[in-house]
Structures are given as C-alpha cells and as structure tokens.
Image: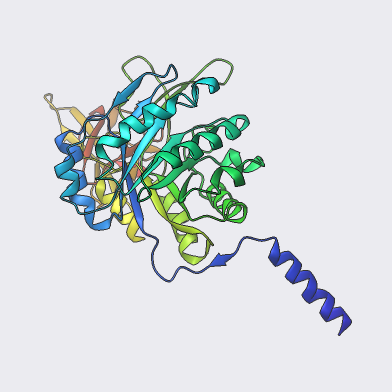
C-alpha cells in the first residue's frame, strides 16, 4: 500500500506540472486574417464566400514600418459588414522599430482606431517584439488598454520565443486574448510549418499562460532568399519572386496543418479557444492555398490528390507539350519526377521542372516543392517523340 501511495503521489505531482488536456466536444472556431493591402474584387469575393466558416475577421487596418512611417489600408466596410461577422482590427508594428520609439506610437495607434472603433469588436496588436523588450511592450499595452473603449477586447500576436521570458505572464495578464503564431521563416529544413513543433509550442503555451488563446495557422507559402552567411535576405509572401531573383519556396503543406488540427481535436490544451488563419485565400493570391483546399483542411476532410501527366500535340508532328493536371478538389504538391515514354528522344523542362541528367527513359525533375492548385493544369516542358506514349508521375 505504501508503494501504491507513493506511485499515486508521484503521478499527482507530475500532473500538476503538465498542461491540462481536454477533448474538444466541438470543432474549434476559425478566424481569418485579411492581410492584403489592396481590397481587390478577389479579396471581397473571398470574404463573402468564406463567411459561413469564419467566426470573426481579423483585418489589417494599418502598419508602421521600421522607421515609424505609417501605411493605412482602405477597407470597404459595407462589404465586411454584409458578412455579419465580428471584426478585430489589427495594427501591425515592425519588430525592427527602435525600442525608444514604442511609447510614442501610442497616440498614433489610437488615432487609427478611433474612426472605426464603433465597427470593431476588438483590437489586435501584431508586433514581433524582441524578447528583451517585452517589459517595454507590457507598459505600451497597459497604456493602450486604458485608452480603449471598455467594449473593445484587446489581443496581441505572441511568438513562441517569448516563452523563455519571465515577462510573459505580466505581458499577457490583462489581455482579453492572445494569438500564438506557430509558423515562421527561421529554418528552411522545417519549411514554414512543422506540425510536431507547433503542437509542442501550443501545449507549452497553454501551460505557461492562464488566458484564452488562439493559434495562428498558415494557409500560404513564402519564397525566401538567403545570404551567403545563411541569414535571411528577403521574404516574398504574396507574389512570386521577380524574374532573375531565384529563391527557395518554404511551404505550409495542407497535410501538415491538417495533422496538427487533428491532434487538437483529439486533445487540445486548456485555454485554446480557436484558430486564426493567416491569411484568407483568394483566387488571385498565387502564394496562398485555394479556397477549396482551405475549406477541406478546416473540415478535416482532405482527400487524396490526383495529379496526372500527359503529352499534348504541338506545331510539329513529332513535338509534344508535357503537361500536369490536378484533377482533384484540393491543391497537390508537384510530383518529384515525370518519366517520359522511351519513344521520346529529346526533352526539356519548364515552370519548375528540368531535364534530369539520366539515360532512358527521359525524366523531368521538379526543381522545388511548389503546388498545383485544384482543377488546374501546368505546362512543365516539351518532348520530341516518334509517337505518343505513356507519361508516368512519380510522387
């Protein structure tokens, strides 16, 4: 009995230091960031078409760059209000802004919130604050809270690196909500999102804070360039890199994000109240998932991908265009290889593919980890073949 009692005490002691786990009886609600600086017809259309699966919009209102210059976003408020969803206005502050200038930003933040405060349900500050400056940030948020209407909820975007700081608890103590960002451009080997790392961060965060929080998940890719010393040189997240600049694609694979959401459905840490997606996909956003893929991931119903390759006749009788087709309802990763028929004597790649330095049959190899959107086609090269034959996709 004494041994059993000792074991029970040990278990109780361990459970006190572990994050509380709950099985979610209902799916977590989903917010969406609308981060586009220009509200094009494509953005407006996505907002209208996605309102049925979105709890609240998190709209970029304005942002301050590293020098303190402000840029505002012109939002078509009637289109947003027509969705009948709450709106959280987001103010973005560049993390490179000099620490001494942070207190002076208060008046400017308030000035940008006042004209739309009657429309907003809350305010979010998105500031990638260096961990060493969290005390200054805490004072800034306290001053901002005192100047906001009591009806406005105050939230912030939080970084996993902050969990190493003793300042995390004072920083979050008086906030209504926190959004933990678990996607980052820091290690190209992990891509943009690692589901196992994200789950560790979320569970650690749930143990550290005692406030409601959401997790920000990516629905986009970025192209990055690196300096010779391995440091990040540039990030392009909304459009392809300009010609000649090269770059590496860091992907947030739908399958990886779906895996994380499945883990949260099985048992999420206490305090996790929802998901905030960055960013709302649109038909014109070449770096985001398609709307169909996003909706499938949210629903937990990501079907198998269906990518096929084929030869399309070109101008000459023996010349063929090599194409890829995604016949499925969701985005698909490009195949690693496309093997041509032995009857093909010459070939070359295009649009993310190159001719492999192999013998026969000729093989086109993917040069990156891009995706092909649902129900789309892509020309990936040409081939000279004596007669049409089979083309094999190798995933």
Query: How many marks are shown on the rendered structure?
Result: 0
Q: Nearer the viewer, residue 92 or 259?
A: 92
Q: Position of residue 171 (x, y in %)?
A: 56, 42
User: What is the quadrant of the C terminus in the image?
Assistant: top left
Q: Residue furthest right?
A: 2
In this picture, residue 21 sits left or right of residue 175: right
Q: Up-down: is 127 above or below 278?
A: above
- The picture quadrant where one finds residue 290 is top left
Q: Which of 108 and 340 is in front in this view?
A: 108
Coloring applied to the structure:
rainbow
Whether residue 47 is visible = yes
In this picture, residue 388 sits left or right of residue 131: left
Q: Position of residue 5 (x, y in %)?
A: 82, 79
User: What is the quadrant of the N terminus in the image?
Assistant: bottom right
Q: Up-down: is 287 above or below 266?
A: above
Q: Residue furthest bottom?
A: 1
Q: Nearer the viewer, residue 118 or 302?
A: 118
Q: Where is residue 284 in the image (x, y as percent from the top left)?
A: 21, 35
Q: Position of residue 107 (x, y in %)?
A: 39, 28
In this picture, residue 153 sits left or right of residue 311: right
- The picture quadrant where one finds residue 225 is top left
Q: Nearer the viewer, residue 387 or 189?
A: 189
């Amino acid at each position: 009995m004494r041994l059993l009692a000792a074991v029970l005490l040990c278990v109780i002691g361990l459970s006190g230091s572990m994050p509380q786990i709950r099985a979610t009886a209902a799916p977590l609600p989903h917010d969406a960031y609308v981060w586009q600086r220009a509200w094009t017809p494509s953005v407006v259309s996505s907002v209208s078409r996605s309102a049925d699966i979105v709890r609240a919009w998190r709209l970029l209102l304005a942002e301050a760059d590293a020098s303190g210059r402000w840029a505002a976003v012109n939002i078509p408020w009637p289109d947003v209000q027509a969705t009948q969803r709450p709106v959280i206005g987001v103010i973005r502050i560049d993390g490179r802004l000099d620490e001494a200038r942070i207190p002076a930003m208060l008046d400017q933040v308030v000035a940008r919130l006042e004209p739309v405060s009657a429309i907003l349900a809350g305010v979010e500050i998105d500031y990638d604050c260096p961990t060493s400056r969290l005390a200054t940030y805490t004072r800034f948020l306290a001053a901002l809270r005192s100047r906001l209407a009591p009806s406005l909820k105050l939230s912030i975007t939080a970084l996993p690196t902050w969990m190493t700081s003793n300042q995390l608890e004072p920083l979050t103590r008086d906030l209504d909500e926190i959004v933990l960002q678990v996607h980052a451009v820091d290690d190209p080997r992990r891509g943009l999102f690692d589901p196992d790392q994200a789950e560790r961060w979320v569970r650690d965060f749930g143990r550290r804070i005692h406030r409601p929080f959401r997790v920000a998940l990516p629905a986009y890719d970025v192209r990055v360039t690196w300096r010779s010393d391995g440091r990040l040189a540039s990030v392009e997240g909304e459009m392809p890199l300009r010609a000649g600049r090269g770059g590496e694609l860091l992907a947030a694979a739908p399958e990886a994000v779906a895996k994380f959401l499945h883990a949260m459905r099985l048992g999420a840490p206490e305090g996790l109240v929802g998901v905030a997606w960055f960013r709302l996909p649109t038909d014109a956003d070449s770096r985001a998932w398609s709307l169909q893929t996003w909706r499938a991931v949210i629903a937990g119903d990501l079907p198998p991908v269906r990518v096929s390759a084929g030869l399309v006749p070109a101008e000459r009788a023996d010349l063929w265009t090599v194409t890829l087709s995604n016949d499925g309802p969701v985005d698909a990763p490009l195949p690693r290889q496309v093997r041509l028929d032995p009857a093909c004597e010459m070939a070359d790649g295009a649009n993310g593919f190159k001719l492999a330095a192999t013998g026969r049959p000729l093989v086109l190899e993917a040069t990156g980890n891009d995706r092909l959107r649902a129900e789309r086609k892509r020309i990936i090269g040409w081939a000279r073949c004596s007669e049409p034959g089979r083309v094999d996709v190798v995933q």
